[in-house]
Image (cartoon, coloured by chain):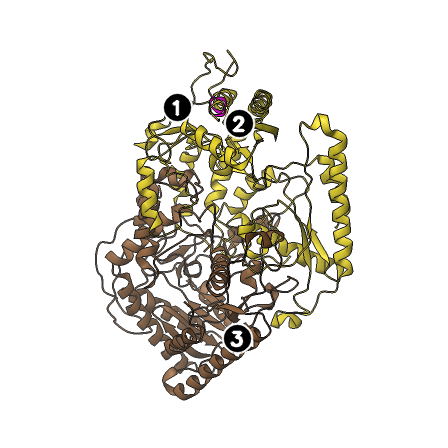
Chain colours: A brown, B yellow
């Protein structure tokens, strides 16, 4: 029985010793598996059979391996061949407090939540009793300062599509007369104006048609699909370590900001006004590209500008129930402090590794545990990810030659050292 | 405790008698509530307080009332004021086998499904063991003939956005040389071609930017948002009852088909080739507009035409678990036969009502339980929906003056008569 496998954390323990860093203090936050345990290469025979079955009904080119989500626990992902891997990718940072956290299984087994999980409400019209309360204690509790309202959507692409619509509507309501509805009934000019959004090279905002017009990571995503002709600015390409390249990086950021200003002026002059600017705080899919806080402040300065968005479903309320619990766990277990500590270990470890293997690794970077490093080329990067996986560490790539690290917030210094040791072994094996 | 409230069906019973149709045989498929039970007007005081709370963080103009999804059961929706209503709208046809069907609560409480509900997998890369099996026994088991492959998405809009992309890609791969990826890296011509999709007036396909370019129901949805300039054809406006207007309706459908052909030729000549045609089998949001099977066959004839779609999440696997169970229940309980029988009662009842109130009602229409009727004008329609609600029947509008009926598949003849009685009472009260 699955439920009985979940055990609450019981104690602190100390490490016995690590190749990467000897006798470091560790905290095991939860009684979980005591390390990776590999039985086959990954994907193993069972994963391969399942992939063949799935191939009969859909493309499997992106499938890595099949997982046993019931057996996975904390920082460890278990696959269908029984391989247990330390997960430093966590479904692209989507398992915030680890696999099968007891707080979340409790939400699921609470009889009073049953109705929310089995009946899908049209939240926009017939929300459940706790809808508002869960939003207030969930999303609003972690909303950036100054955000006072919230509307949920089913996925990231839909959220961005609706944000884009909000930008256009706001631009028109604020700046121009509110055109009569009649004009737009045939859905072309003047009801549907020729407004544009400015986005950045290397940005990823989703793959639906509106989002896709602002996504510029892989060419294959856009080929053959009609798109909006909107302005695209360069994103700063910083040099690392930051401390050594302060002047060069400041110049690079200034160059990009200047380009943004030029594009806005140019497109406004063409009569295709720029209604908004869309940017990722850290370009992830595009290669874990950071810019300085100063860059964002100045960008905000350039764009300084002071709703008609309806969705029937407003996403899935079960996610609000889970999110509220996730936030509670993050607070009660001080997981943000934990992430800072673990992030420090990871980044210092990456610095050491790039010093040790300068011909292979460079540009170690990150904030908290949101870290990345570049490998000398794409093939070597892909090879390194596979080697690490077969040694029991799940990693993910991004950009052309980066590896991005996305551990859960329950990833402790102990896990960080464990990861660095195995990562070091995998690198050492590269020719 | 919620679980204990669910009782499996135990017996057949017979009706005592109805105003609308006396002493008809009824089958009560489940022991459920024995009828509507109203305690307050709807929205009641508790709903109003909750709406005020929600208004602090989002727009509530579309909120009807707040629901108690834990207390709702079978065909009955219970609101937070304890009002129990016969639901002939079921969250826009999204509660296929009734509220809290025991088969679905069983899926939720099965410990082996826990991991799927609490850990969100990136299905496109790391699917769970049963992923393929659930797709085969779920979506593929009910796929239209000739469909051999399936890819899931998180919501209807995302599904349509990706279907549109598939159309464009297919059009280019089939008809033209596969352009080098390099050309599209800057994401404008020639990588992103000026292809178009033909859609129909009154169609609803979602509100994301690609979908929105093919949605033509309410002008407010599109105002101020940049759109693709794509061709729009008229959708047949049929006259009812169909038997009396065969010649007129055939002419109307021929007119629309001719317009489709003209548009395709015209747009192809402009060099803005029509890569695909998008149509709803029954236009729902646009007013429950039907066309004949013959119309669709001829449209297919006009468009006769013989992948590069990736999504990280591929929707939500928990929905596959629930869908597989829904399909099983539909089969084992013969719910499609049930829907045919109930639909017949509903449609005959609507015919009777429009004969009785010809100054108020017209154009009763439907297939199965997917029925609709027109009310003389928008205000009267809205008024009638509110009156019915206060008598314990939940209905939904569509188009400018239609009411659409969307009961669950567990809606029996008994519920149909109950609905018709109350609907009749509500109509009789209209001035």
Residue sticking out furthest to the left: A11
Query: What is the distance, in whole Å, between disc 1 and disc 3 at their CAs?
Result: 62 Å
Q: From the image, tell me which residue sits under label 1.
A: B33
The chain letter under disc 2 is B
Query: Residue A42, image x and y in percent?
Result: 49, 59
Residue A202 visible, this orientation: no
The chain letter under disc 3 is A
- Characterize the magenta stretch by its predominant secondary structure: helix
Between B49 and A102, the one lying in front of the other is B49
Q: Is residue B99 left or right of residue A262?
A: left
Quadrant of the rendering where the N terminus of chain A is positioned: top left
Disc marking residue B251: none
Q: Secondary structure at mark 2?
A: helix
Q: Residue at x 45, y 42 (%)?
A: A122
Magenta-span inclusion, residue A344:
no
Query: What is the distance, in whole Å, between disc 3 and disc 2 at their CAs?
Result: 62 Å
Q: Secondary structure at mark 1?
A: loop
Residue B77, relative to residue A121: is it above or below?
above
Span colored in magenta: B422-427
Q: Crowding near pointer 2: few (<14 within 10 Å), some, many (20+)?
A: few
Q: From the image, tell me which residue sits under label 3.
A: A264
Residue B344, relative to residue B100: is it above or below?
above
Q: Is residue A184 left or right of residue B276?
A: left
Q: From the image, tell me which residue sits under label 2.
A: B332
Q: Crowding near pointer 3: few (<14 within 10 Å), some, many (20+)?
A: many
Query: What is the distance, in whole Å, between disc 2 and disc 1 at their CAs?
Result: 23 Å
């Amino acid at each position: 029985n699955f439920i009985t496998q979940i055990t609450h954390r019981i104690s602190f323990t100390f490490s016995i010793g690590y190749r990467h860093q000897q006798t470091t203090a560790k905290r095991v936050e939860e009684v979980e598996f005591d390390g990776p345990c590999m039985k086959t290469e990954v994907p193993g025979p069972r994963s391969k059979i399942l992939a063949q079955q799935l191939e009969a009904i859909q493309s499997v080119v992106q499938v890595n391996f099949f997982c046993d989500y019931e057996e996975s626990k904390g920082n460890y992902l278990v696959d269908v061949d029984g391989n247990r891997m330390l997960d430093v990718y966590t479904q692209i940072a989507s398992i915030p407090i680890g696999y099968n956290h007891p707080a979340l299984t409790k939400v699921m087994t609470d009889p009073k939540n049953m109705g929310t999980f089995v009946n899908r409400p049209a939240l926009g019209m017939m929300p459940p009793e706790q809808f508002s309360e869960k939003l207030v204690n969930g999303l609003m509790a972690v909303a950036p300062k100054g955000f006072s309202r919230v509307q949920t959507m089913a996925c990231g692409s839909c959220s961005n599509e609706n944000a884009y619509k909000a930008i256009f509507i706001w631009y028109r309501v604020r700046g121009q007369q509110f055109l009569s509805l009649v004009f737009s009934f045939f859905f072309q000019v003047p009801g549907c104006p020729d407004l544009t959004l400015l986005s950045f090279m290397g940005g990823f905002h989703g793959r639906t048609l509106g989002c896709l017009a602002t996504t510029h990571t892989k060419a294959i995503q856009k080929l053959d699909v009609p798109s909006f002709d909107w302005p695209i600015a360069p994103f700063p390409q910083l040099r690392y370590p930051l401390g050594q390249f302060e002047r060069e990086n400041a110049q690079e950021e200034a160059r990009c900001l200047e380009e943004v200003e030029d594009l806005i002026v140019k497109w406004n002059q063409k009569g295709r006004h720029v209604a908004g600017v869309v940017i990722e705080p850290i370009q992830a899919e595009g290669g874990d590209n950071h810019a300085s806080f100063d860059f964002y402040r100045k960008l905000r300065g350039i764009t300084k500008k002071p709703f008609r968005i309806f969705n029937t479903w407003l996403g899935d309320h079960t996610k609000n129930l889970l999110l509220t619990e996730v936030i509670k766990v993050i607070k009660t277990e001080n997981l943000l402090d934990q992430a800072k500590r673990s992030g420090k270990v990871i980044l210092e470890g990456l610095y050491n590794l790039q010093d040790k293997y300068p011909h292979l690794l460079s540009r170690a970077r990150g904030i908290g545990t949101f870290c990345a490093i570049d490998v000398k080329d794409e093939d070597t990067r892909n090879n390194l990810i596979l080697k690490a996986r077969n040694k029991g560490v799940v990693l993910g790539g991004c950009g052309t030659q980066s590896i991005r690290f996305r551990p859960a917030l329950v990833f402790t210094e102990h896990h960080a050292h464990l990861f660095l040791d195995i990562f070091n072994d995998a690198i050492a094996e590269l020719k």
